Amino acid sequence: MRGTKELENTPAQTIALATFIKLMRATESVSADVHRRLRDCSLSISQFGILEALYHLGPMCQRDLAAKILKSAGNITMVIDNLEKRDLVSRDKDTGDRRYVVISLTARGKKLIADIFPAHRERIEERMKALNARELQTLGRLLKKLGRSGSKALVRK
């Protein structure tokens, strides 16, 4: 057949692709399981991420929140708009620099995240029990290494 030679993978490509597929399937499976109950609260994963970050880290500027939950500045604006409409977060301009906007949880937002976070944490713990403590530490170290390698790979090209 013509062109099949171009589609053949080297052994390194084969293992990289197979591992990537396993990583993506595991990520989707665990994420879907852990986040399933967010629909009951009418929250998206991004909205939950913002509430959780503010709950554990305190008020933050929009840029820092975007970096924390790995979203673009444009996307985070829409997510915060929707949370603000539901009175779960508030935007407050910094008195020293009015361009700097701090996002905070409202009383309603604090109550919601305080109510749902314990069950969320338990679902994560239950799902991660598939691995023992040593395996979790190894996986964490490997994922951190993989995540940090992305910027280096882009610079090389």
Image (tube, helix red, strand yellow):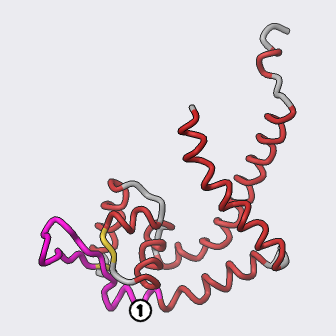
Residue 157 percent coordinates (x, y): 57, 31
Magenta-tinted stretch:
90-113
Name the residue beneath numbered marker 1: 111
Is 29 displayed left or right of 131 in the figure? left
The answer to if 101 sits in the magenta stretch is: yes
Secondary structure at badge 1 equals helix
Res 84 → quadrant: bottom left
Is 93 displayed left or right of 2 in the figure? left
In this orientation, which residue lies closer to the viewer: 94 or 129? 94
Is 120 displayed left or right of 65 in the figure? right
Q: Residue at x 65, y 73 (%)?
A: 34
Q: Residue at x 59, y 89 (%)?
A: 118
Res 64 → quadrant: bottom left
Res 98 → quadrant: bottom left
Position of residue 106 relative to residue 138, above or below, is below
Residue 17 percent coordinates (x, y): 77, 40
Which amino acid type is shown beneath numbered disc 1? Lys
Q: Residue at x 26, y 79 (%)?
A: 90
Residue 71 percent coordinates (x, y): 44, 58
In this orientation, which residue lies closer to the viewer: 79 or 64? 64
Is 12 displayed left or right of 156 in the figure? right
Residue 127 percent coordinates (x, y): 75, 76
